[in-house]
Amino acid sequence: MMPADTQPRTVRVDLADRGYDVVIGPGLLETLPQRLDAMVMRPRAAFIVADANVADASGRCRESLERSGIAVGVTTIHATEPGKSIATLAEILRSLGEARIERGEPVVAIGGGITGDLGGFAAAVYRRGVPVIQCPTTLLAMVDASVGGKTGANLAIGDTLQKNMVGAFHQPSLVLADTRTLGTLPDREFKAGLAECLKHALLGGCLGDTDHLGWFESNTERVLRREADAVAELIHRSVAFKAAVVAGDEFELAEDTPGRVGRALLNLGHTFAHAMETLKGASPAGRPADSPLLHGEAVALGLLCAAETSAALGLIDRGLGPRIARALEACGLPTRAAGLPDAMRLLSLMGADKKTSGGRLRLVLPTPGCTARVVVSPEVSAVEAGWAAIKGA
């Protein structure tokens, strides 16, 4: 659906002199030159890092920049988890060098979260840092990956892929969430983005917004029909929530500080999800075995695992898990996974997560009132109960 008649909305990520705008609306890619002018950033050149699947979007952006007199270099990547690698990062860096991009000349990352992470990481380390403009083209990237400055690549150690094990904090100068790009996003990928939106709703109480979850549940059908105003409101709510958390804890250091909402809470469900994503045989139950989990699908399942683990520890009652399952089913997201190994293997994979500290597992688990907390070294039986909640045929 997505008619292009929604007025742009802007969320400010307030990081003092490094703050930036997240602009949400249709047709924004073509406005990049004017926005660079408004930011007093009129570069000689820019360099686009684009997912190979978004040629139309990157083409529109390139044409607008070239019409304004900015020279544009382009490299395309195949955005897969195995391809989110140091080797791909090196290819991007070589391309930046060959294009003679200078400091002050931006990298423009166009695509989903993998593209944004790699493009942002390249910008962070090339010439010790050049600006990056994030132009997310998937719902998941719009509501989460493009905002907050986390960049990175996966690291292959033996036969295990360790998610985002290398990277840097590098805030964008601007985020343009062009909702027109969602009109052609495949249904499965669109639905996968809803998992991160649900995660934000489940955390709304951390910032006093206990109505966020109810709004999400009440508007799921409209969002799935891709009604422009509902989708724009969904993105705006998620971005505003994440922006507030990032502004208070940019470098994820405050999860144990009283009175502050730590950025670590945004990892709700993700330690489970990342373990699943490293498994070649894991897939949504009911789909072909050669249909690996998308990141958003893994997060959806991880939210269920986290809720069941929290219930097993006595932190919440057992009503939240079924409520999350109903919300996921309404979104067309999986509630069971196939191809999972035994509990010992899963626990081992979780132990390799980058958030592990001092050899101790740290899980973000839901607590009453749409809040969450970091639990260090949870009881193994409780974590096993979390995994058991999603194991399917």
Image (tube, rainbow, N blue to C red):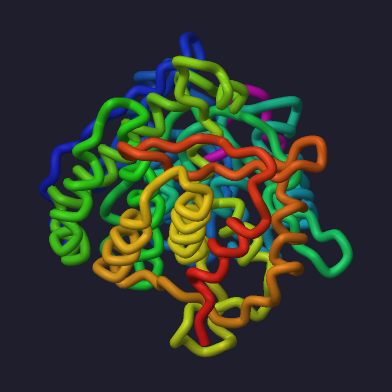
Q: Nearer the viewer, residue 213 or 8?
A: 213
Quarter where residue 251 is shown: top right
- Image position, residue 341 (x, y; %): 69, 77
Predominant SS along the magenta part: loop
Q: Which quarter of the rendered picture does the N terminus lie within?
A: bottom left
- In the image, residue 230 lies in the stretch drawn in magenta: no
Residue at the spot 70% in from the left edge and 75% down from the top edge: 342
In this view, 326 is above or below 197: below
- In the image, residue 107 lies in the stretch drawn in magenta: yes
In this view, 226 is above or below 89: below
Q: Residue furthest right?
A: 158
In this view, 77 is above or below 314: below
Q: Nearer the viewer, residue 385 or 357?
A: 385
Q: Nearer the viewer, residue 248 or 80?
A: 248
Region rendered in magenta: 100-108
Count of numbered tags: 0
Residue at the spot 46% in from the left edge and 43% down from the top edge: 315
In this view, 123 is above or below 155: above
Residue at the spot 15% in from the left edge and 64% down from the top edge: 221
- Image position, residue 327 (x, y; %): 28, 62
Quarter where residue 245 is shown: top left
Report if residue 200 is visible in the image: yes
- Image position, residue 37 (x, y; %): 38, 22
Residue at the spot 19% in from the left edge and 38% down from the top edge: 211
Report if residue 91 is visible in the image: no
- Image position, residue 242 (x, y; %): 40, 33
The answer to whether 320 appears left or right of 252 in the picture is left
Q: Nearer the viewer, residue 41 or 327?
A: 327
